[in-house]
Image (cartoon, coloured by chain):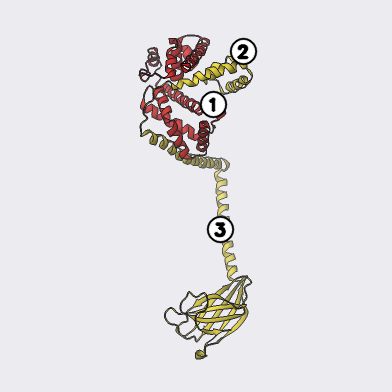
Amino acid sequence: MRRDCDHLIPYIANELKESERIAYVEHLKDCTKCKEEYQELSQAWHALPFDYTEIAVPESLKGEVLGFVFDHQTKSDTETFMAKMSKLMMKFKSHFTPVSTSILVVLLLAIIGLGIANVQEKNRHAANIPIEILTTIPLKAVNQSHTGTNGIAYIVQQGSEKNLVVQVHELPGVEGSQVYQVWLLKNGIRENSGIFKPDENGSGILTYQLAEGQTFDQIGITVEPDANSSQPKGEKIAGS
Amino acid sequence: MKENYDAELMILVNEKHGHALEELYDRYIKLVYGFVMKFCNGNEEKTKEIIQLVFLRLWTTNSQYDPAQGSFVNWLLTITRNICIDYHRKEKRHTQHYQEEHEEIADFANVIEQRVNTNDIEMAKNKLPTAQRKLIDLLYWKGYSLSEIAKLEQEPLGTIKSRLHQALKGLRKHLELEDIK
């Protein structure tokens, strides 16, 4: 124990090796004499730094110190990243001979090539899904002045997707911002399912994607003053 | 309260909050600057470099300040002093002017110390015998280790250790007397 007590002074002066320091801290817990002495002497030791005259700190120092610290941070971040990358490369190199590297490259290229071919094949397959017409709904003129208006609506299915296709002929022409708007009527509620403008022959076509499970009772086509109607404002021209 | 606030600031610094480091700078730069200037004999360039390293250490350290182990100021000054010592050791290794250094120590002169300083510790230190005062200056302010000083003074290490013991005891006594006055 006597030898341990000798470590008091080098401990205060911060001169013990890490293992000695840890041992002395343990010793300090049990040795009353050292504990007392340590309290007394370390107080004097910690008073030592206050033996200086206060000097005005240059204004520019703050920027120089904090700038140095934060710059160092960014630099060391980049360095660690670069170091990690080069370490990875070294590891890679040590694991692969030139022959195995070239084999690996060839295999990787083959995998990528096959992957691309596979995706293209799938796309072609998608294009090949047959379109099935589920329902055909004839559309008749409603307006007495244009009795010639006629058309047809289809519900078509491709894969899991259902579309409503509305095709109308001999429509009266529209002026300015006027458009034709298609409404789906379900339980007395009209839902907007798109607008279209007829060509110079009075023909127009519209495709509307039906939500999953969406059904309707009737189709109505009205002429609307502009493309912004959320409820029919204009005259009904045709319907199912 | 104060120690807790410093401990909280250090936690924020560990979590890399720049504003917390800036606050520590504002709170303690006067103390650190005065300390390092004294350690560097008033050399402003070295002082700047050391202070940069001190704050870099605070920013990158993984060790936590523990209020149970003593005041934050003591902790900060211990770090600062360690960096001062490292810096001067490295510099010494570069220049290797051991002989010159030795002469310089023999006639000890400290630019800052020559200024009038009437604070308690200064007064307490002045009451110590010359040998003890010189030991404290060499050890604390010049960063020489106990065994280096033994070699310089051509005395056994044990003598140097017990001289430091006496010096600290004496300081403590004089400081207490100052408090009573």
Disc 3, SS: helix
Q: Colour of chain A?
A: yellow
* Alpha carbon separation for disc pair 2 and 1: 26 Å
Q: Is residue B101 above or below residue B74?
A: above
Asked if residue A106 shows in the view, the reply is yes
Amino acid type of the residue tagged 3 in the rendering: Gly
Q: Residue at x 57, y 49 (%)?
A: A104
**Residue under label 1:** B70
Q: Chain of mark 2?
A: A
**Contact (Cβ within 8 Å) of mark 2 with mark 3:** no
Q: Residue at x 41, y 34 (%)?
A: A65
Q: Is residue A2 above or below residue A230?
A: above
* Alpha carbon separation for disc pair 1 and 3: 67 Å
Disc 1, SS: loop
Q: Chain of mark 3?
A: A
Amino acid type of the residue tagged 1 in the rendering: Gly
Give whichever of B110, A91 is nearer the camera: B110
Residue B46 got which mark?
Answer: none
Give whichever of B181, A44 is nearer the camera: B181
Residue B48 % position (x, y): 39, 30
Q: Colour of chain B?
A: red
**Residue under label 3:** A113
**Residue under label 2:** A2
* Alpha carbon separation for disc pair 2 and 3: 78 Å
Give whichever of B169, A83 is nearer the camera: B169
Q: Residue at x 56, y 58 (%)?
A: A113
| Of the image marks 2 and 3, the number of the one nearer the N terminus | 2
Picture quadrant where residue B133 is located = top left
The mark closer to the camera, 2 or 3, is: 2
